[in-house]
Image (tube, rainbow, N blue to C red):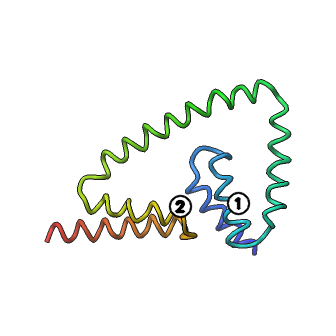
Amino acid sequence: MMFELFWRFVLISLLAFGGGQAALPLIERIAVSETGWVSPQDFAAAAAQQLQRFLQHEWLRGFGRGAAPAVVGLLAVTALDIARHAFVGWPYVLIAAIALPLALWTKVHPILLLLAGAGAGMAIGLLSDA
């Protein structure tokens, strides 16, 4: 059990960029949906308790209201920059078109999507060199 807990949080630390707010949905998915370690209600209560403690400070609420739009803008610029370099041909657009609905509407683990995309890219590269 301890090794599984350790391994799962290693994956979270590798996949979640942007601090606790970015990691929270992944932690929830692992702790509630995949492993069943806690119920959705228990997870929501533990998360709400921690957030409530921080949100009591007005300056922190103001910081969050100002930082959130900036983060969205930075994420959009980053996504566009990555897309500009990633979509160098229709096969790569097809990989993205397959990965997006799988990520949004299924329970396929993000690591599997990354590995599948990398494998497809390698295969495309090998076939284009042949």
- Number of marks drawn: 2
Is the C terminus in the top left, top right, bottom left or bottom right quadrant?
bottom left
**Element class at badge 1:** helix
Indicate the quadrant where residue 94 lies.
bottom left
Tag 1 residue: 28
Looking at marks 1 and 2 on the same chain, the residue that comes earlier in the sequence is marked by 1
Kindly identify which numbered label has been placed on residue 104: 2
Nearest the camera: 49 or 122? Answer: 49
11 with respect to 122 (left or right):
right
> Whole-percent x and y of residue 18?
59, 44
Q: Tell me the crowding category of disc 1: few under 14, some 14 to 19, or many 20 or more residues within 10 angstroms, Cα based.
A: some
Q: Position of residue 10 (x, y in %)?
A: 62, 61
Residue plotted at (76% across, 24% down) = 59
The secondary structure type at the circle numbered 2 is: helix
Q: Nearer the viewer, residue 73 or 3?
A: 73
What is the quadrant of residue 98 in the picture?
bottom left
Residue placed at 69% from the left, 27% from the top? Answer: 63
Foreground residue among 82 and 104:
104
Which label was assigned to residue 49? none
Q: Residue type at mark 1?
A: Glu
Mark 1 and 2 residues: CB-CB less than 8 Å, in contact? no
- Residue at coordinates 84% horizontally, 61% vertically from top-left? 42
7 on left or right of 58 = left
Identity of the amino acid at label 2?
A: Leu
Residue 32 occupies which quadrant of the picture? Answer: bottom right
Residue at the far left: name it: 130
Q: Circle 2: is it few (<14), some (14-19), or many (20+) Cα within 10 Å?
A: few
Distance from Cα at disc 1 to Cα at disc 2:
15 Å
- Furthest toward the bottom, the residue is 1
Quadrant where the N terminus is found in the figure = bottom right
Residue 74 in the image: x percent, y percent?
49, 35
- Side (left or right) of 110 relative to 5: left
